[in-house]
């Protein structure tokens, strides 16, 4: 017997369940360790059962008539009469106190459920622990899902010492030492160990099969061959069940237990990378032999059979396939001849979502749409990769890459966006509408990354193409980003001219989203041209438009640059108010660029009055910049000069080492943690007078909401449009970091108006 590794939480949960229910079923995908966990539970519970614990292996039981006999045989029931086996068994168990483990029930769910129901009804001292890929489905059953072993996060650097706290790594090390006793995780192989555990989904059987290859391969070599995992992961324990000796046999067993509809959906779902929602499953997979309306029921059955895993985040429910299950499905899809059709439907689904986000960007749903795109990022990248590399699909791929512009920028995916857009431009050599659009979006991303030379080249081409076609909207986009190039190069006067041209063009075609983006950029140029009052005027106009439309993304940026202008005018209180309001909005968006710029602004403000606080803020901003993959320097010499001058004041006051230590202390801050630090959440909570700053109108609307009035009723009471009220309500929710009107009402009750 091999050693038992990890599972502390699962042991505790199952033990607790066994104390409450007489039937506990351990469910989960094949190879996840249900049997091993059941055996461990039975061993630990042995003393609690006067008549012992018994394990009945059902994998080899193929028909209902043999089921009861298998239990009778395992328990060595002494009755040799010709009575029915079920009568022998119930009479034998009636007065006994014991635990029976029914292992591998999934291929005989109905007969096992009927047997268990009968036994529990006649034997009050009996408890049953079952293992199955789906629950038995009878009254009183307590189902415990057995998850994969914990794995190290794949997207951060780990030291050899830090990864053995994860169960999958500990199992790999333990089994590796059975093969090569001197095996150790080192600086050289730690990355490969993390990759292996993640790519095998933390599935114990897959990890154990992988360790058998250590006789001939290094960990790095095993990882390099995992794309052929079904050929690689063979040669398991010879005394194990046949289906547990190779990875393919394990998945084959699950596949054979599925209906035709389940098999079809399994194959089609393999086009998804990461997770998906119900709408995606219906849109992409619901066609032909599988009706769209039937997808939800088939999905539910695949979840029950542990082919799909459910991920919950609040009210959001998403489905996910383990990588091994997905690759098996991909083989099935390739064999079916449907791969091209399903891939096209997959790409078109996300292209439609991206188009909808752009069309509705200047409105109330920005944060929700952006969060949805972030969740779907792996699928977006997969759809783009397929489109760019598949003949005949490049145009649709280019549209998707362009329509994802807010995802690249506001979502913080600059590197991925740049790479995809350059792929599109490399493939679309001839001038045309798709190339024209991709040029200015690629330039936008490059400028934010501080890469001005290629951006300038792309913008000149875009401008020439727009002029040749007489395309005013495209000309406005090129003018906008040419203006940013001027601004980031230090030529604020030229930037102002181009920004004003761009805004006029956007107004003429009714592109409000681009108008608002360009407006806060114009205010940047104005304030760094010394025209601070003009900048504030531009901000006021833009903020009013954002409020009218219920728009928040450009609104937050406009608040930031308004704060910068006020800081230049020595209005520290006004600058701080704007900055804090911008960050309150960013609670919803978490746009790394705006978060970093605004925390920088707060550090400049504090550099004249609280050096320790300024150092903390500067360190938090640097952490956000690092995570984004750019720096404040990318935004031009003027902003960089302000940042450097403020940092120099802090260094002069505290000393270089102390400031460097503070930056190092905050180097691993998440965006949420940086926002908490910047908004001084914990300190603010301790102040009796602490409260977010609402405008007079926002306070007025919040108080009416607290009285139970609908948005329409509020609009009628204040004689303003319902859409304006919608925008105010969204900003109140963002500033207060709330998600419901009930929370607003509670807050008003505890924070009466002071106006």
Image (tube, rainbow, N blue to C red):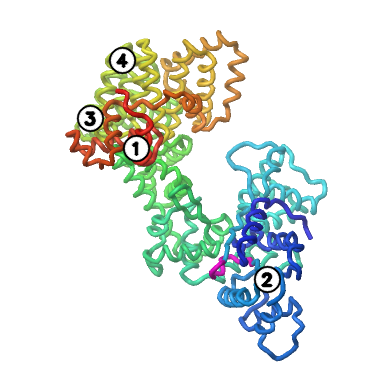
* Direction from residue 719 to residue 233 in the image, left or right: right
Given contact means CB atoms under 8 Å apart, are the residues at marks 3 and 1 in contact? no
Residue 412 shows in this picture: yes
Question: What whole-number distance in Å separates the C-alpha atoms at marks 3 and 2?
Answer: 81 Å
Q: Crowding at label 1, few (<14), some or many (≥20) Cα neighbours within 10 Å? A: some
Question: What whole-number distance in Å separates the C-alpha atoms at marks 4 and 1?
Answer: 48 Å
The residue where tag 3 is placed is 505
Q: Residue at x 52, y 31 (%)?
A: 673
- Image quadrant in which the N terminus is located: bottom right
Q: Nearer the viewer, residue 57 or 337?
A: 57
Q: Nearer the viewer, residue 414 or 290?
A: 290
Nearest to N terminus: mark 4 or mark 2: 2
The residue where tag 4 is placed is 493
Question: What whole-number distance in Å separates the C-alpha atoms at marks 4 and 2?
Answer: 87 Å
Question: What whole-number distance in Å separates the C-alpha atoms at marks 3 and 4?
Answer: 19 Å
Find numbered disc 3 in the image and state the secondary structure of the residue it sits on.
Answer: helix
Nearest to N terminus: mark 3 or mark 2: 2
Nearest to N terminus: mark 1 or mark 2: 2
- Residue 298 falls within the magenta-colored stretch: no
* Direction from residue 359 to residue 204 in the image, left or right: right
The residue where tag 1 is placed is 745
Find numbered disc 1 in the image and state the secondary structure of the residue it sits on.
Answer: helix
Nearest to N terminus: mark 3 or mark 1: 3
* Direction from residue 231 to residue 319 in the image, left or right: left
Q: Position of residue 713 (x, y in %)?
A: 21, 41
- Image quadrant in which the C terminus is located: top left
Looking at the rendering, which quadrant does residue 24 occupy?
Answer: bottom right
- Mark 4 or 2: in front is 2
The residue where tag 2 is placed is 125
Q: Position of residue 315 (x, y in %)?
A: 43, 49
Q: Position of residue 589 (x, y in %)?
A: 41, 35
Given contact means CB atoms under 8 Å apart, are the residues at marks 3 and 4 in contact? no
């Amino acid at each position: 017997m091999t050693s038992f590794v990890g599972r502390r939480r699962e042991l505790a949960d199952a033990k607790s369940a066994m104390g409450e229910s007489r039937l506990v079923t351990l469910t989960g995908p094949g190879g996840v360790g249900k049997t091993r966990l059941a055996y461990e539970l039975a061993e630990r519970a042995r003393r609690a059962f006067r008549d012992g614990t018994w394990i009945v292996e059902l994998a080899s039981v193929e028909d209902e008539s043999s089921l009861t006999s298998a239990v009778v045989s395992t328990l060595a029931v002494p009755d040799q009469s010709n009575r029915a086996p079920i009568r022998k068994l119930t009479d034998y168990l009636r007065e006994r106190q014991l635990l029976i483990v029914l292992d591998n029930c999934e291929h005989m769910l109905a007969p096992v459920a009927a047997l268990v129901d009968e036994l529990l009804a006649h034997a009050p001292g009996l408890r049953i622990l079952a293992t199955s890929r789906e629950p038995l489905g009878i009254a009183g059953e307590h189902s415990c899902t057995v998850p994969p072993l914990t794995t190290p996060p794949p997207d951060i650097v780990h030291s050899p010492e830090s990864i053995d706290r994860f169960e999958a790594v500990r199992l790999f090390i333990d089994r590796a030492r059975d093969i090569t006793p001197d095996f150790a995780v080192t600086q050289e192989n730690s990355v490969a160990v993390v990759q292996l555990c993640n790519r095998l989904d933390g599935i114990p059987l897959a990890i154990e099969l992988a360790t058998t290859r250590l006789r001939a391969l290094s960990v790095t070599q095993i990882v390099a061959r995992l794309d052929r995992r079904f050929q690689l992961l063979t040669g398991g324990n010879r005394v194990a069940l046949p289906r547990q000796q190779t990875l393919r046999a394990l998945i084959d067993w699950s596949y054979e237990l599925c209906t035709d509809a389940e098999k079809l959906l399994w194959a089609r779902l393999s086009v998804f990378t990461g997770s998906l929602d119900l709408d995606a499953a219906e849109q992409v997979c619901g066609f032909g032999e599988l009706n769209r309306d039937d997808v939800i029921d088939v999905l539910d059955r695949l979840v029950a059979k542990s082919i799909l895993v459910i991920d919950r985040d609040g009210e959001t429910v998403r489905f996910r396939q383990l990588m091994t299950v997905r690759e098996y499905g991909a083989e099935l899809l390739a064999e079916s001849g449907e791969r091209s059709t399903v891939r096209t439907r997959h790409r078109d689904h996300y292209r439609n979502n991206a188009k909808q986000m752009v069309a509705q960007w200047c409105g109330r749903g920005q944060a929700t749409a952006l969060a949805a795109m972030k969740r779907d990022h792996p699928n977006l990248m997969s759809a783009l990769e397929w489109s760019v590399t598949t003949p005949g699909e490049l145009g649709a791929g280019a549209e998707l890459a362009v329509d994802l512009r807010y995802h690249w920028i506001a979502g913080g995916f600059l590197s991925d966006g740049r790479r995809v857009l350059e792929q599109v431009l490399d493939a679309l050599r001839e001038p045309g509408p798709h190339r024209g659009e991709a040029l200015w979006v690629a330039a936008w991303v490059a400028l934010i990354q501080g890469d001005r030379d290629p951006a300038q080249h792309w913008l000149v081409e875009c401008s020439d193409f727009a002029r040749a076609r007489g395309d005013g909207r495209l000309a406005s986009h090129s003018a906008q980003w040419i203006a940013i190039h001027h601004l980031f190069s230090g030529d604020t006067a030229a930037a102002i001219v181009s920004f004003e041209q761009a805004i006029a063009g956007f107004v003429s075609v009714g592109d409000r989203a681009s108008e608002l983006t360009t407006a806060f950029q114009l205010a940047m140029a104005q304030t760094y041209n010394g025209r601070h009052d003009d900048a504030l005027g531009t901000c006021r106009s833009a903020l009013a438009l954002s409020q009218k439309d219920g728009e928040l993304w450009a609104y937050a940026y406009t608040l930031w640059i308004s704060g910068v202008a006020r800081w230049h005018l020595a209005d520290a209180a006004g600058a701080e108010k704007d900055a804090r309001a911008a960050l309150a909005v960013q609670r919803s968006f978490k746009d790394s660029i705006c978060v970093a710029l605004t925390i920088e602004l707060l550090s400049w403000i504090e550099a004249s009055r609280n050096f320790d606080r300024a150092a903390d803020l500067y360190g938090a901003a640097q952490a956000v910049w690092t995570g984004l993959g750019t720096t404040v320097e990318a935004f031009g010499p003027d902003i960089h000069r302000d940042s450097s001058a403020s940092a120099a004041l802090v260094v002069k006051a505290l000393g270089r080492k102390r400031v460097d230590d503070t930056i190092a202390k905050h180097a691993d801050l998440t965006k949420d943690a940086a926002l908490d630090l910047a908004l001084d959440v914990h300190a603010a909570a301790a102040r009796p007078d602490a409260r977010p700053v609402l405008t007079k109108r926002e306070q007025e609307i919040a108080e009416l909401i607290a009285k139970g009035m609908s948005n329409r009723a509020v609009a009628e009471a204040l004689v303003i449009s319902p859409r304006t009220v919608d925008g105010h309500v969204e900003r109140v929710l963002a500033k207060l970091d709330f998600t419901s009107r009930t929370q607003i009402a509670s807050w008003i009750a505890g924070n009466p108006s002071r106006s």
